[in-house]
Amino acid sequence: MSDGNLEPHARADAGALLARLRADLVLRGHELVQLPGGAFIVSRWQLSHYCADLEDLRAFAQRLGVES
């Protein structure tokens, strides 16, 4: 999800969601890297998972036990 097409309030909501997910993932020992174009890499213990956008990241984080 590229947030360039979002309204300002939706961009703020997306930013808040990303901040919560990042904090929760870090507390669980994961590293989160945001790639150009809005994709993400979540890694831990030399394993990684590609997330195409924020919604994909949210779904993956839920599988790890993160509530969003």
Image: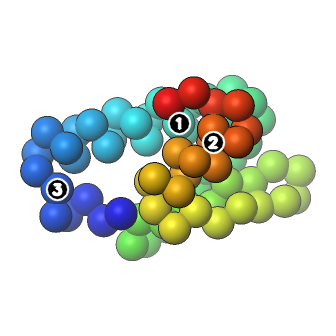
Secondary structure of the residue carrying tag 1 is helix
Q: Is residue 26 visible?
A: no
Which residue is at a point 32% across and 41% down the rendered structure image? 15
Label 2 crowding class (10 Å Cα cut-off): few <14, some 14-19, many 20+? Answer: some
Q: Is residue 18 left or right of residue 46?
A: left
Q: Is the C-beta separation of discs 2 and 1 under 8 Å?
A: yes
Q: Amino acid at mark 1?
A: Leu
Q: Amino acid at mark 2?
A: Ala
Above-or-below relation of 4 to 29 = below
Which residue is at a point 55% across and 52% down the rendered structure image? 57
Estimate the x, y position of residue 49 in percent, counting from the top left: 71, 61
Which residue is at a point 40% across and 36% down the rendered structure image? 17
For marks 2 and 1, the one nearer the N-term is 1
For marks 3 and 1, the one nearer the N-term is 3
Q: List the residue tagged with mark 3.
A: 6
Secondary structure of the residue carrying tag 2 is helix
Residue 66 sits in quarter: top right
Q: Is residue 1 left or right of residue 53?
A: left
Q: Is residue 28 visible?
A: yes
Circle on res. 39: none
- In this picture the colour scheme is rainbow
For marks 2 and 1, give the CA distance.
7 Å
Q: List the residue tagged with mark 2.
A: 61
Q: Is the C-beta separation of discs 3 and 1 under 8 Å?
A: no
Question: Of residues 56 and 29, which is closer to you in this image?
Answer: 56
Q: List the residue tagged with mark 1.
A: 21
Look at the image and tell me in which quarter the N terminus lies: bottom left
Which residue is at a point 25% across and 59% down the rendered structure image? 3
Above-or-below relation of 1 to 12 = below
Estimate the x, y position of residue 46 in percent, counting from the top left: 87, 58
For marks 3 and 2, the one nearer the N-term is 3
Estimate the x, y position of residue 27 in percent, counting from the top left: 69, 27
